Amino acid sequence: MRLDATLMTDPRRSGRTRELAAAAEQRGFAGLWTPEINHDPFLPLALAADATSRITLGTAVAIAFPRSPLVLAHTAWDLQAASGGRFILGLGTQVRPHIERRFGVPWQPPVPRLRDYIGALRAIWHAWQTGARLAYQSEHYQHTLMTPFFSPGPARHPDVPIFIAGVNAGLAQLAGECADGFHVHPLHSPATLREVTRPAIARGAARAGRDPAAITIATSAFVITGDDTRRRAGMREMVRQQIAFYASTPSYRAMLEHHGWAEVAERLTALASARRWGEMPALIDDAMLATFAVEAAPGELAAALQARYAGLVDRLSLYLPFEPGADDALWDTLLTSFAG
């Protein structure tokens, strides 16, 4: 199991992005992931690629459907070249309100659309690499024109790994069918990994005649730690709030239902619809917190994470940004444990 870090950056501080990436590589992290929250997820990776030479760089995740497959194919192709073959394209589908009302694009069922999207990406890359005629036509995407003037041509590292992200079984099964990896949403538990996610990946792999072991499983863990009582209490409430926010999303309800908390999920959705955000964390009791998060003292956190995730995931990051100078002892302990 490899330990990765999350790269949270401000585009107004490009020098700082380089410093963070270089520090993460020097510290010994296996990979750096950028999310798509309030900034573009790709631009920081171009800076990170220039500042590093070994660490894996990827999006966790970029939202696929607002972007044309061809536009995204160019971005991924260029980042793969800039990083010397260290880039991973992590794609997410997002939920319907965000696709329609935030991104302003039409909603379609995500699993068949993402399957077509991945097919389009690989067809475009194949045409660039081999010079073959581009002739991809599916239900959702048609790419049939690629003249030499618009092709970047063959690359030294043409095989761009594609990870997809999800909460429920449908997208996990799709990952087994046609992706290189699956990003498990932070709202998960060992039980859902064991009983929902991994079996779904295996079903998808069997459908496509693939080995499920070839699909890398990555996730981000909610953690509560600290020697200082006040800080630990603050982290506990922050995680409680984040779990409440995620669990209020109807399509994420299955994670709570799996543990018998369907009624809590319904109440969270109702509160979110009424914009009563402040009342939501109180519905996440300590049993739920223990199910979806890892709480341990700094010196015991590595062992707790290893015990929780061994045999279930291949890559792990914490739901905390890496910041040199903050929690250095904790990161060093974790990295030493995972390296061993």
Image: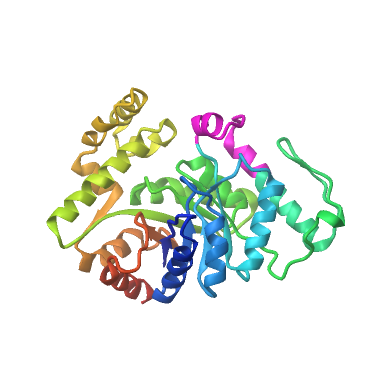
Whole-percent x, y for residue 126 in the image:
76, 58
**Which quadrant of the figure contains the N terminus?**
bottom left
Give the residue at the far front of this rendering. 12
In the displayed structure, would residue 330 be above or below residue 252? Answer: below
Q: Residue at x 86, y 57 (%)?
A: 148
The overriding secondary structure of the stretch rendered in magenta is helix
Q: Is 76 left, or right, of 152 in this rendering?
A: left
Give coordinates of residue 2: x percent, y percent.
43, 67
Q: Nearer the viewer, residue 98 or 166?
A: 98
Residue 105 seen by the camera = yes
Q: Is residue 36 magenta?
A: no
Q: Residue at x 63, y 71 (%)?
A: 84
* Count of numbered circles in the view: 0
Depicted 148 relative to depicted 197: above or below: below
Residue 119 visible: no
- Give the image location of residue 273, x and y in percent: 37, 24
Q: Residue at x 29, y 35 (%)?
A: 260
Give the residues drawn in magenta, as a range.
95-116
